[in-house]
Amino acid sequence: VNLLRYWSFSLYFIVSELWASAGVPLLFWQCANDVTPMAQAKRFYPLFAVTGNLAPIVSGKIMSFVISLQKNNDDAGFGTTLQTLAVIKGLVCFGIITLYRHVYAMAEEREKKERMEQSLSTIRGIERTGKVEITMKFEKKKEKLTLRQSAKELMKSRELKAMAMMVFCYNVCVELTEVLWKGILRKTFPNKSMYMDYMARFSQTVGVVAFLLQLVASEIINVFGWKWTAMIPPVTMGVLAMAFFAAVIAGEEKIPLAQALLIGTVQNVANKVTKYSLFDPCKEMAYIPLGPDAKVKGKAAVDVLGARLGRSIGAASQQLLVLLVGGGSILNCTPYIGALYLAAIAVWSNAVSVLGQLFESSEDKIKKVDNTPKLESIGQAITIIKSIEDRKREKKQNGGTGNSSDAKGRKPKA
């Protein structure tokens, strides 16, 4: 009932969630794939990821600055802060649209320049050789699947189902701990402005830690390999979540609410940092052994369905627990939420193991071939051919020399 009563806020939150799950991962990277040449992808894609981690830092600073300008801590002052942030968001959206059009315009200009250079090169070749060479390139039309078709393709592949399960379980875990953590946060900071200021500092912390971890993420993958790197997010999140649940279950008599909030904050920072720096790169790497068709056909279902379904299941399970055993409070449901969290971590770890076996089998197929015997055989063959040619050359020289000496030695008959 309250969702319908405050429908504008509900719609705003839904659109915000869709933007985070579908807007950035799909639309941005689609734009990047369209305008970035293959030769420059390895150079710029890591830079895109590192630069993206600066966004929480900037947004946190802006939120803190806007909150500092708020004169009153009542609802009127908080409303003014929200209006200011909404105006800033609108300006940022306008900037995104402008940059989007400008980037595609530059890409079209680059393509025109490349076609012009190719035409001039062809003309120069015709003038130099007098021949006309026509190269016809046929590109296979990309098949665009609907979300339902992508889901069908996902069910056919064991590896795609494992990837979808990874995304699903991650979002279930995030939903289970985030709602509980925010419940403690609202209890600790009942004032809306103080609550928003804490979230601004939380965003800055996530950005800084994610930026630093992103710089060493490639080294972590090189040292531990795909499987154990992909295991870091569930293990880290699981250990911190158990500590957080234990602190909440112990109650304020044994563990102060501020300490429980601190443990929950660290756990939620780990949720986001490990996703940006390790979970997402490992997930994208998991498509490589499957080939391009699997990525095109299953990515939409893995990224969108897995993420949204995970959030929905996590939220629905908490609502049922609050109604059945919580007595209207999410804090009373902590033991049951912890059990669901452990189950999700176990399923997530099993999915990582399945994909890890895929990577190991792919690496076993790539055998290192020792070319030394082949090179030695080729060298021997070259030596034999060279000696035969030398002998032929010597015979010709000897034959020519012998004929000339015979001609000189013969005397004309009288």
Image (cartoon, grey):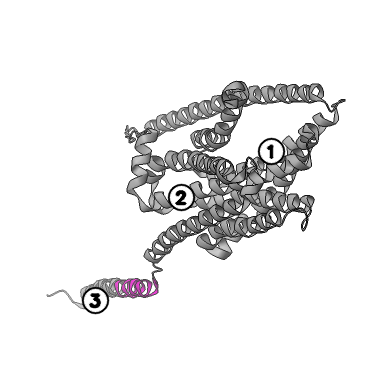
Q: Which mark is residue 402?
A: 3
Does the CB distance between marks 2 and 1 fall below 8 Å? no
Expressed as whole percent of the image width and height from the top left, the position of residue 216 reads 65, 56
Expressed as whole percent of the image width and height from the top left, the position of residue 335 reads 60, 54
Q: Is residue 272 visible?
A: no
Q: Which mark is residue 165?
A: 2
Distance in Å between CA atoms under marks 2 and 1? 28 Å
Q: Which mark is residue 324?
A: none
- Residue under pointer 1: 55
For the residue pair 128 and 205, the one nearer the viewer reads as: 205
Q: Amino acid at mark 1?
A: Ala
Seen as rendered, the residue at the extreme bottom is 409
Q: Is residue 121 left or right of residue 238?
A: left
Indicate the quadrant where residue 366 lies: bottom left
Residue bounds of the magenta highlight: 370-386
Name the secondary structure under disc 3.
helix
Q: Foreground mark, 2 or 1?
A: 2
Seen as rendered, the residue at the extreme right is 71
Query: Which of the marked residues, 2 or 1, is nearer the chain's N terminus?
Result: 1
Does the CB distance between marks 3 and 2 fall below 8 Å? no
Distance in Å between CA atoms under marks 1 and 3? 89 Å
Indicate the quadrant where residue 235 lies: bottom right
